[in-house]
Image (cartoon, rainbow, N blue to C red):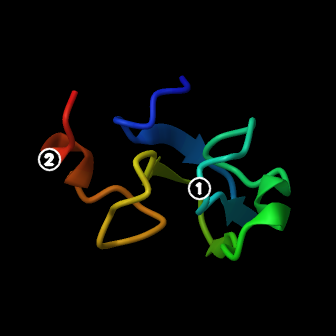
Amino acid sequence: MDDPNHPYVMTLKPGRYVWCACGRSQKQPFCDGSHSSTNMRPMFVEITEEKQVAWCGCKTSGNKPFCDGSHKKLAA
């Protein structure tokens, strides 16, 4: 799914993940280094147990890097 107006919902295994904060990554919701020409930096997240996660796709969440429903307020 590559729609910034919806969260990226997935089940993750324990590990370290790098969430794209700039929106330029071709591997959303994860960072691919595309931010290098911006002043933005990705967010590192440690998942300690297998669980379902809703990553923010719109980049406006008040609970980054996770979705808080802010995308519902954006124009379609």
- In the rendered structure, are the residues bearing label 2 and label 1 in contact, judged by CB atoms less than 8 Å apart? no
Secondary structure at numbered mark 2: helix
Query: What label sits on residue 9 in the rendered view?
Result: none
Three-letter residue code for mark 1: Glu
Outermost residue, top side: 1
Eyeballing the image, is 4 above or below 18? Answer: above
The amino acid sitting under disc 2 is Lys
Which quadrant, please, contains the C terminus?
top left
Would you name the residue on which mark 2 appears?
73
Closer to viewer: mark 2 or mark 1: 2
Q: Position of residue 2 (x, y in %)?
A: 55, 26
Residue 72, quarter of picture: top left
Residue appearing at x 69%, y 50% in the figure: 30
Q: Residue at x 72, y 45 (%)?
A: 25
Against 28, residue 45 (above or below) is below
| Apparent side of residue 38 relative to residue 19 in the rendered image (left or right) | right
**Residue 13: horizontal and vertical position, in percent?**
68, 53
Q: Quadrant of residue 28?
A: top right
Q: Position of residue 40 (x, y in %)?
A: 66, 73
Q: How many marks?
A: 2
Position in image of residue 61 (x %, y %): 33, 63
Whole-angstrom CA distance, mark 2 to mark 1, is 30 Å
Q: Residue at x 21, y 51 (%)?
A: 69
| SS label for mark 1 | loop
Mark yes or no: residue 15 visible. no
Residue extending furthest left? 73
In primary-sequence order, the first of circles 2 and 1 is 1
- Residue at 25 percent of width and 59 percent of height: 68
- Mark 1 burial class by Cα count in 10 Å: few <14, some 14-19, many 20+: few
Q: Say few, some or many: other residues with alpha carbon within 10 Å of mark 2 (under 14 / 14 to 19 / 20 or more).
A: few
Q: Which residue position is annotated with label 1?
A: 50
Asked if residue 33 can be seen in this view, the reply is yes
